[in-house]
Image: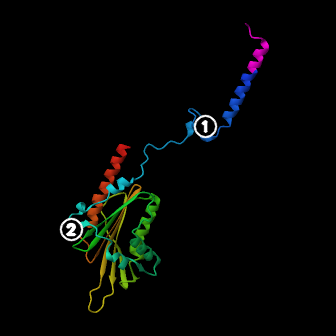
Amino acid sequence: MPVPPARLLAASALTVAALVTVSGCLGSVPDRVARRVPGSPAAEQAPQASPGAKPALTQAQARAALITEADLGAPWGPTEGIATWRDGLLKAVTNVPECQRLLDALYADELLGEPSGTSAVTSLDDGDDQAQLRYRVAAHRRADAERSLTWLRTLPGACTQFTAATTVAGLQSVQVSEIQLPQVGDDRQGLRVTLTGQANEDEQPTILTMDVAVVLAGDDAIVLTDGALGELPADATRQALEVGVQRLAQIRERGRALA
């Protein structure tokens, strides 16, 4: 049966009204919803993750990148606890602000400040030389790490020699000089810090020698301190850095291949 013209007009009016209503609703959809609609301008303009972006260092990667006693050989072994000289000598006070900052950073084991992400640390002892080596792998914002590295480079000049007072070991004469590090990583800085105590007439002066090394590799950093009362074990700093930086690079490369 033919549909009366009046009904056709009514149906057309309803259809137009419905289309206008739907169009108005779409026009008021929030941007966060519109971005999910395939083909919408918002979806096409949404920022995409860079395919070459370097993934953040994971806890497993940081731990795997640490050196071990096997990397250094005998007489290095697992640590038996915090070295006695850390509290006795590094917990010190001086009236030179930049040098105080160095002492505080050495005592807290934070030469680059707080890591921005994952961090793993290990300590090894050399019983023959009464030495302790602390080795940290951590994620740091590159700009922050570079500023800290710039500061470290000023210390052989700003803190060439100064006096620091300790609670346990009395006054210490402190010297800071630069040491050469192996050409590893993207950037690096090495320091030697020597603390010499004032001796009594019948005693030899106590001498703490510390090698300090910082290596930047992308957004990761390696911080090493190697200290001993007397002479430092030969080549421990160089060997630890050469092995450790290569290991970190290999672990990073495997991580990118699996991503």
Q: Residue at x 23, y 67 (%)?
A: 76
List the residue tagged with mark 1: 34
Task: Answer whether residue 10 is magenta in the image.
Answer: yes
Measured as percent of width and height from the top left, residue 30 is found at 64, 40
Specify whether 126 is left or right of 110.
left
Q: Which mark is residue 231?
A: none
List the residue tagged with mark 2: 75
Specify whether 117 is left or right of 175.
right
Indicate the amino acid at tag 1.
Ala
Where residue 21 sits, quadrant-wise, is top right
Task: Answer whether residue 28 is magenta in the image.
Answer: no
Where residue 128 sits, quadrant-wise, is bottom left
Q: Which residues are magenta?
A: 1-12
Where residue 31 sits, quadrant-wise, is top right
Measured as percent of width and height from the top left, residue 4 is found at 77, 11
Specify whether 257 is left or right of 145.
left
